[in-house]
Image: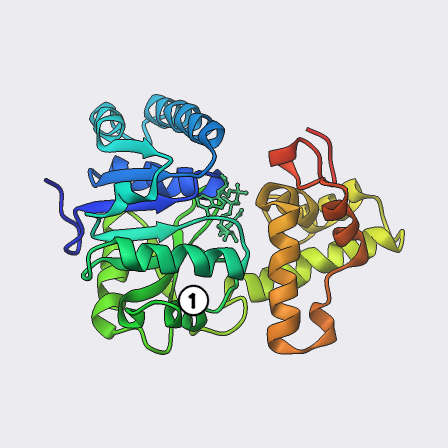
Amino acid sequence: MTNIAGFQSVGVVGGGQMGAGIAQVCATYGLKTILVDINPKQIETARTGIAGSLEKLSTKNVITAEQKIAAIGSLAYSSDLSALKDCDLVIEAIVENERIKTELFQTLDKLTKPTCVLASNTSSIPITRLGAATTRPDKFIGMHFMNPVPLMKLVEVIPGMATSEDTTRRILDLAAGLGKETSRSADYPGFVVNRILMPMINEAFNALMEGVATAEDIDKGMKLGTNQPMGPLTLADFIGLDTCYAILKVLHEGLGDPRYRPSPLLAKHVEAGWFGRKTKRGVYKY
Ligand SMILES: NC(=O)c1ccc[n+]([C@@H]2O[C@H](COP(=O)([O-])OP(=O)(O)OC[C@H]3O[C@@H](n4cnc5c(N)ncnc54)[C@H](O)[C@@H]3O)[C@@H](O)[C@H]2O)c1
């Protein structure tokens, strides 16, 4: 059985765009992986999405045909959290809401074996606070994958105040074993990636709101003018406007600086249920 940094079996909770990608990568590298979502429809969406992505990656020779077959064989799905009781590691990738994540971690804390490491893929919620809600803050850590997980190289690793060095080292080794590069950030709001990325996305919404330019021109300006793969509004639709809004609220509250206040136009999109690609409408229509 494959063993990376002492981890043989991994549970992933949340089968949305991030959770499905994380489960896919863990399974591609041979780890016994279980993906859990409370929504059975989402499990089917994840199953189909993962199969399609593995097919595409193997056609493009990003993964081997053996890895594709191994991934499908290593991956199980469930809507029941108790399927995770024997896991060595559980990575949470549910909605960006501290109350819901805390409740989930308290349940996972009771359900999993004491040696199991608990990790959150949160974009911004304090790791120390989530870990403190469990009886194992030393085995609790932030493991922030980037979207789309099978293609993006980075995992931002965020130890909380009480995370042990052993846990941090194992998670850094695991990420490397999954073919990723890692960066290490301290547990401050938004860590590094979102603390710097979200103000740019927010400013793009404010520029759009003030009529400085059209959405297309804002994206074109930033894409071609600053050599980014896509403009900030396209990227926001890709991340999920609900997720961007939640992260900005955490930055605003946590850092107490008005420059992080979410743009009213971003808030309006979220109120309208226009969350981006995943709801087929965000700044753009899909
Ligand atoms: N979208 C991004 O680009 C991105 C990047 C890095 C990190 N993140 C973080 O990853 C997490 C997930 O984001 P996403 O974009 O995949 O969201 P998403 O909305 O695509 O998926 C969330 C999934 O969680 C499930 N869920 C909700 N509550 C649950 C529960 N109690 N138990 C089990 N499943 C539950 C939902 O059914 C849904 O399938 C968030 O914390 C987000 O901040 C997102």
Q: How is the model colour-coded? A: rainbow
Residue 206 in sight from this viewpoint = yes
* Closer to us: 243 or 205: 243
Q: Residue at x 75, y 53 (%)?
A: 267
- Write the residue at 54% across / 54% down: 96
* The C terminus lies in quadrant: top right
The answer to whether residue 120 shows anywhere in this view is: no
User: Split into 4 quadrants, where in the image is the N terminus?
Assistant: top left
Direction from residue 1 to residue 164 in the image, left or right:
right
Image: 184 above or below 149:
below
User: In the rendering, at what x and y percent does residue 29 appear?
Assistant: 23, 39
Tell me if the residue at label 1 has its CB under 8 Å from ligand 1.
no
Residue 115 picture quarter:
bottom left
Q: Is residue 271 left or right of residue 13?
A: right
Between 77 and 276, the one nearer to me in the picture: 77
Judge the density around disc 1: few (<14), some (14-19), many (≥20) Cα neighbours within 10 Å: many
Q: Nearer the viewer, residue 238 or 94?
A: 94
Question: What is the x, y in percent for residue 75?
Answer: 27, 32
- Look at label 1 and name its amino acid: Leu
Q: Quadrant of residue 66?
A: top left
Q: In the rendering, at what x and y percent does residue 271 appear?
A: 75, 47
Extreme residue toward the right, this view: 211
Task: From the viewer's perspective, tell me whether residue 214 is left or right of residue 192.
Answer: right
Which residue is label 1 attached to? 130
Q: How many marks?
A: 1
Q: Nearer the viewer, residue 121 or 221?
A: 121
Q: Secondary structure at mark 1?
A: helix
Residue 15 found in image quarter: top left
Q: Residue at x 48, y 69 (%)?
A: 126
Above or below — where is 41 with respect to 174? above
